[in-house]
Amino acid sequence: MNIRRKWGKLILIVSLVAALAFLVPTTLAYMFDHAGSLINTFAPKTDVLTEAPVEIVIEKTVLSSTDKKMGPEGFTFQLEDVTTGEKQTVTTDKDGAARFLLIFKAEDVGQLNEFKVSEVNDARKDVTYSDVVYTVKVNVTAVEDRPTATVQVDGKDVEACVLPFENIYDPG
């Protein structure tokens, strides 16, 4: 009985191999005859591979010496590129937040960029403005052939660039 099983298995395996030997070349030939040229549709995301964004976040608070309060919205901040002198401005929202977004590309690798961030005094009545000026340095290097930005604020390395500004409202 054991001999029959062994021969039966062997016959089954030989039959399958013979059938596959006949079918596979025919199937492959059909596929190559009827399939057009292969088209590679993969395209890497170029913005991920070629840009290093840096976000500079402004956090504005307004302290009051009385019960009268002033909200942190509507204050203007300036970012100045020390090298080029170019300036950008942003205005705080109702929560006192504003953001500068700097994008560095592959051609910026090897550059150390320096910026000054300050508040613009728009002469609001009874407001003492913050006179803080932050120095933000962005060093752009290549990591695995991609631009990567590291940030320092006033000489200290930071993971997130959050700059607090505080004004005093004294309506008298």
Image: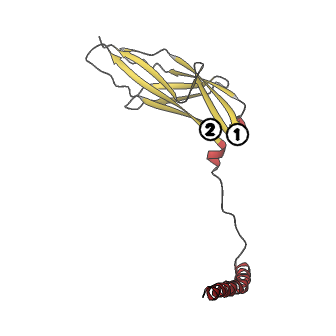
Q: Nearer the viewer, residue 146 or 80?
A: 146
Q: Nearer the viewer, residue 135 or 31?
A: 31
Outermost residue toward the left in this view:
67
Q: Which residue is mark 2?
A: 52
**Occupied quadrant, residue 10:** bottom right
Figure label count:
2
Label 2: element kind: strand
**Occupied quadrant, residue 102:** top right
Label 1: element kind: helix
| Image: 78 above or below 13 | above
Q: Which residue is mark 1?
A: 106
* Image spot of residue 107 (x, y percent): 72, 38
Q: Which dot marks residue 21? A: none
* Image spot of residue 73 (x, y percent): 38, 28
**Occupied quadrant, residue 61:** top left
Q: Earlier in the sequence, mark 1 or mark 2?
A: 2
Residue 146 horizontal side relative to residue 60, left or right: right
CA separation in Å, label 1 and label 2: 8 Å
